[in-house]
Every structure is written in C-alpha cells, then in structure tokens.
C-alpha cells in the first residue's frame, strides 16, 4: 500500500475525534496491522502508547496546541488516573504556557523508580492536601492541582520565564489574587521559596499575551526600567492603549504578535484606526518602538533600538 492509498483509507475510517485510542480505531475498522503500516508510512502519528492522530492534523497545529494535544493523549492513554501538576496542570486550567517541552507532569506521593515511568511522563513527589486537588474545568474525570497550588509549584520549580508567563496569565484572567499567591508561597515548604517570591515580584496582571510577558522580561533583563503595561492615552481619535510605555520619556513599546499565540487577528478597520491614533501620538512627541517574536531572540539588537529611542526622547525634551 502506498502513502496516497493509506491516506485515503485512514481518512475514510478515522473516528470523528482527532485523537483515537487503539480500541476506538479497531471499532472503526482499523486493524492493528493496518495501524502499524500507517505509522511506518508517516500517515498516522503515535503520540504515546495506545493513542494516535492523523499526521496531517498534527503538523497543522500551532506549538501551544500540540502541548495541549500531548496532554490529552496522556489522559486518553491512562484513563485520567493521574493527578496533573506543574505546567501540565497550568494547561488544563486554561493558562498560557510558554515552551513547556514534551513531558507530561504528574504528581505522586512517593519517589517511583525511573524504570516504572512512561518515557513521556515526569513525576513529582508532592505532599498534597485534599484541597490541593481539583478536577479539570469541563472534565470532572481529570484531576489536577488547584490553581493556587499549580502557580506556587510553577513559581518554585519552573524556569523563571516560564513561571512568569503562567503567573501573568492567571492574574490577567483574575483566577487568583497576587496576595493570595504570596501567602501560599510563604506557607509552602522553604524549598524554592526565594525564587518563587522573586517571580511574584515580576508578575504583571495587565500583560495580555505570552509575547508581551517575554518582551517585558527582556527589557528588564537588558537593564531598562520596568515599563508601565497597558498605558491608556487619549487622542482625538479615541483611546490608545500601549502595550508598554515609559511615560516620563514619552516612549511606547508595542509587541506585534503577528498572530502567534493569538486566536484572532485585528480587522483592517481596527488596524487603520489604531494607526491613526499612533500618528496623533507621534505628533505629540511620543516615540514608538515595535518588537516582534523574532526580536526576542536578538537581545543585543533590542538593547540598541531601545537605547536609541531613549536617547532620541532625551534630545526632544532638552
């Protein structure tokens, strides 16, 4: 059987859901032998033992969508028997998560032998109280750490940037208050407490996207003052909301996500109105710097551009 024939056959027989277990595929008339052949041809992707997906659907997914699908595959393959924690719990809570990697994070009350773990699973020995475990929104069969416990664990153990992205998302969605988080960190084990408190100090509830969080952190890392997020300015064409600004310098920094990590794109009319407001602000003396995703991996260039904008602002005010 060649690949085009296999694609046609699997397309006709695949169940309605993108993810399918071996049992569901058998019910649909896809035998184990046919399934193995589809995997060899690259028509079907094996996400984990017993869970599959058409490869063309997988390659069409955005990175953060793949993170969610990997997690759904783990749930389907294990029957929801695990308690999910760390970044996996954050995804199930509907939080934005940056670059979590392919591992699925589950909680355990014991230190299991490495040989007993599935290759796609990372276990964490956690002392969980009953109130630390909740069920997933929209799926009561799936258990995970509570929103507060998830955020505390992420702040204590995840890389700084990842933890701030998750914390920003939770605060922006008003799922928890900053002081509640601070109290939970202080009440938790001393391990990782100092870094967790530093992460809480870095959070910004007004930040609206992963890219904005990363841009803000980069500015501070480069030695610039922490900017004001979502500064609102009045113009003759209506209100303008800047992603970031240094008001005393009259410098605005906009992060152009270009659709990445966004579920929508502005309409042409919205973009045109925004550009008119930008023009009015520039006529008032505001200086704009626009950052993109690719810029976040070019810190020296970002430093140069921001420094140039600040120097220009200083000359204008002199």
Image: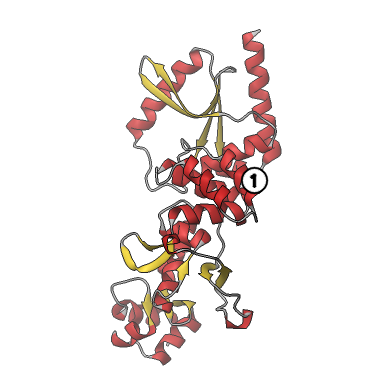
Residue 236 as seen in the image, left or right of residue 45: left
**In the rendering, at what x and y percent does residue 303 appear?**
68, 33
- Say if 170 sits above or below 52 in the image: above
Q: Residue at x 61, y 75 (%)?
A: 111
Choose between 264 and 149: the one closer to the eye: 149
Quadrant where the N terminus is found in the figure:
bottom left
Q: Residue at x 55, y 55 (%)?
A: 154
Q: Kindly give the residue lying farthest to the top in the view shown.
A: 318
Could you say whether the residue bearing mark 1 is in a helix, strand or loop? helix
Residue 259 visible in rendering: no
In the picture of the structure, the residue carrying the numbered disc 1 is 297
**In the rendering, at what x and y percent does residue 313 appear?**
62, 16
- Say if 213 sits above or below 27 in the image: above
Residue 296 as seen in the image, left or right of residue 63: right
Residue 163 as seen in the image, left or right of residue 132: right
Q: Residue at x 64, y 28 (%)?
A: 225
């Amino acid at each position: 059987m060649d690949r085009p024939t296999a694609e046609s056959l699997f397309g006709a027989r695949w169940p309605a859901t993108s993810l399918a277990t071996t049992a569901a595929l058998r019910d649909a008339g896809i035998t184990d032998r046919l399934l193995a052949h589809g995997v060899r041809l690259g028509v079907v992707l094996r996400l984990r033992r017993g869970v599959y997906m058409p490869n063309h659907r997988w390659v069409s997914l955005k990175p953060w969508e793949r993170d969610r699908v990997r997690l759904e595959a783990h749930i389907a393959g294990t029957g929801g028997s695990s308690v999910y924690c760390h970044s996996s719990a954050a995804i199930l809570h509907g939080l934005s998560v940056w670059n979590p990697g392919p591992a699925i994070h589950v909680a355990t009350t014991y230190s299991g032998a490495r040989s007993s773990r599935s290759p796609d699973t990372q276990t964490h020995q956690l002392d969980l109280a009953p109130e630390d475990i909740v069920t997933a929104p929209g799926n009561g069969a799936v258990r995970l750490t509570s929103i507060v416990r998830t955020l505390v664990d992420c702040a204590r153990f995840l890389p700084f940037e990842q933890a701030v992205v998750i914390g920003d998302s939770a605060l922006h969605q008003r799922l928890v208050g900053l002081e509640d988080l601070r109290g939970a960190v202080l009440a938790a084990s001393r391990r990782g407490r100092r870094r967790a408190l530093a992460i809480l100090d870095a959070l910004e509830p007004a930040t609206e996207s992963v890219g904005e969080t990363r841009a803000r952190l980069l500015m501070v890392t480069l030695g610039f003052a922490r900017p004001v997020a979502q500064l609102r300015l009045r113009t003759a064409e209506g209100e303008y909301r800047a992603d970031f600004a240094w008001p005393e310098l009259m410098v605005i920094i906009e992060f152009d996500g270009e659709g990445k990590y966004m579920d929508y794109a502005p309409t042409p009319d919205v973009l045109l109105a925004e550009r008119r407001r930008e023009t009015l602000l520039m006529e008032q003396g505001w200086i704009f710097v626009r950052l993109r995703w690719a810029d976040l991996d070019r810190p020296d260039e970002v430093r140069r551009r921001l420094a140039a904008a600040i120097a220009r602002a200083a000359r204008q005010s002199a």
